[in-house]
Amino acid sequence: MTHAMTQPTPATVAPDALLDVRHLCVDIRTPGGALRVVRDVCLTVARGEAVGLVGESGSGKSMTAFSVMNLFPSPLAHVAAGEIHLEGQRLNLLSAEAMRAVRGARMGMVFQDPTSYLDPLMPVGRQIAETLQAHRFGDDHQARVLELLDLMELPHAAQVARKYPHELSGGMRQRILIACALAMRPALLIADEPTTALDVTVQSGILKLLSRLRRELDLGLLLITHDLAVVAETCQRVYVMYAGEIVEHQHALDLFAAPRHPYTQGLLRSILHPRSRALDLFSVPGGVPIAGHWPSGCRFHPRCPMAQPGICDADAPALVPVGAAHGPGADRCLRADDPQARDAWSQPACTVALP
Amino acid sequence: MNTPDQRPAADRQAPLLEARDVSRLFAIRGSGGLFRPARMQRAVDGVSVVVHPGEVVALVGESGSGKTTLGRMLLGLTAPSSGSILYRGTDIRTLPADAARRFRREVQVVFQDSGGSLNPRHPIARAIALPLQYNRGLDAAAIAHEVDALLDQVGLPPAHFRHRLPHELSGGQRQRVGIARALASQPAVIIADEPVSALDVSVRAQILRLMADLRRDRGLAYLFITHDLGVVRALADRVVVMTGGKVVESGDADTVLDRPAHAYTRQLLAATPVPDPRRQWEATTDTASA
């Protein structure tokens, strides 16, 4: 590893960014050659900010998160290009040992299914203490565990600490996993579909907890989900991914008020809510193409109502910055400035009558 | 899809499937001894539910509310501890042999994870062929024809999907196979236990639309077990809200969602995330000023 390469290039690193991902590409090695599943992803998370990363299954959003943690589910996946900076330190050039000191200490991660990440044969309090041991946290592990359980709004912390995972509900297990992730007071928390497996009432509790922790601990939160309603409840900025690329990012207020990319508009229209009227069970037709079989030109064009032959299937659109009411954004649509594209699916986007 | 004109018609018809004051008790594990009776947990406690032909009834409640146990009792998979399940007016325990066969054919199920209910070594055509063979007694040529027709109907081109194994399909595609297999028996009612909660938002709408179309074309009735009130609004005629094994509220879907009477229903509505980020800033300023 050369010294020059470890120097972050100041010009490209946003000064106040906690997490700064630059032009990230992720490849999977296959017998037929490298398969690029994430292409040119740039995203930032500031301290105390919740950022949503949204897309359907197969859009590459989890792969992006795994790159940040360097926790790929398979040894065949690896970061092929790009830079990942956390608190100004470049992560994707660190040795495995140096990375272990960052992972779990400066950033934590929680997953969709808390059960499979907890040891069924160990009381949960000891599992939280294991994180503290691994990172050589002070002396009084017991006190820190109880403090964390309190922070997670779990009543009777001392009793909960002695319980085994199967004695806790799904929501409580997720709180234990969050406690593990936050044990070393990290600056960044990555949550990959943290509430997808939970009931709505439990989900609402976990989202409120994450928002409170973000404010109180000045935590950067990267929330990965396919549910834009969850993003609206929790996040201040949103990135939308499709087929391995970011297709739009905006401040949450702008994205929900005036989504620019037809895909974002489609996702917004497919939200089902008990208070919304005149639902036609809208869904974006078709499905996400399989990695490696990306369409030419704009990767969304086969599913897009705005697609123009000769334009959208020919030129791959770049992510073009746009200024919006609440902050800068960008979109990857050649026809985004067409007045028709404001309402690509030609019906009011997600009409929600609020109480 | 709420089609109000269908509701009065459904009410006039005799119920297709009915749970009459059913309860189900389970022994709490480890509570009994040799001379000590086990403590019992009431999973379902005196519940009555009616499904009319062509009607969509949503059974709403969170994990542990007893909604899945009630669904299993309506399928005849779990016997009620007390009360009875009636199929076209007859207690399913006293159905004569041929009527019992008709009950098992006409009451079908779709699970949350259809992948788990498909044999991983059987191509999906075989999963759909089995009910055609056993429930409908078709011959090989008719089965092959019918499998293709069913795959077509659920939006899976047969030439491309017939020989696929379950692991080669996406979650949404497997759910379509689950629906095709349920349809193979020509059911009158499908009990769907969280059929879309494991799916992406976009795929969710596709599956719900398919189910709504099938209801319109075949006059199918559904008992939809869910905790998602958005799904209820989109599909259900009536809602039954359960908590702690009891029905706490039931009625016309629009009425229950617009004017929830029970505190639990209101809590469920309040917990459903709203796709409007402005609420975040309103909430923050509220706490700041407080």
Image (tube, coloured by chain):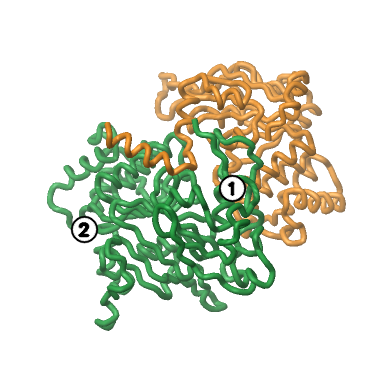
Chain colours: A green, B orange
The percent coordinates of residue A107 (x first, y second) are: 29, 57
Q: Residue at x 52, y 22 (%)?
A: B260
Q: Quadrant of the N terminus of chain A?
A: bottom left
The percent coordinates of residue A267 (x first, y second) are: 56, 51
What amino acid type should be assigned to the residue bearing mark 1? Gly
Q: Residue at x 24, y 43 (%)?
A: A148
- Choose mark 1 or mark 2, whichever is in front: 2
Q: Looking at the image, which is closer to me, B59 or A23? A: A23
Give the chain of mark 2.
A
The residue pinned by badge 1 equals B116
Instruction: Identify the element where label 2 is drawn.
Output: loop
The percent coordinates of residue A320 (x first, y second) are: 48, 67
What is the CA distance from the residue labelled 1 to the residue labelled 2? 39 Å
Instruction: Identify the element where label 1 is drawn.
Output: helix
Above or below, B77 relative to B112: above
- In the picture, measured across the screen, residue A281 lies left or right of residue A30, that is right
The residue pinned by badge 2 equals A135
Give the chain of mark 1.
B
Residue at the far left in the pictured view? A139
Looking at the picture, do discs 1 and 2 lie on one chain? no
Q: Looking at the image, which is closer to me, B200 or B141? A: B200
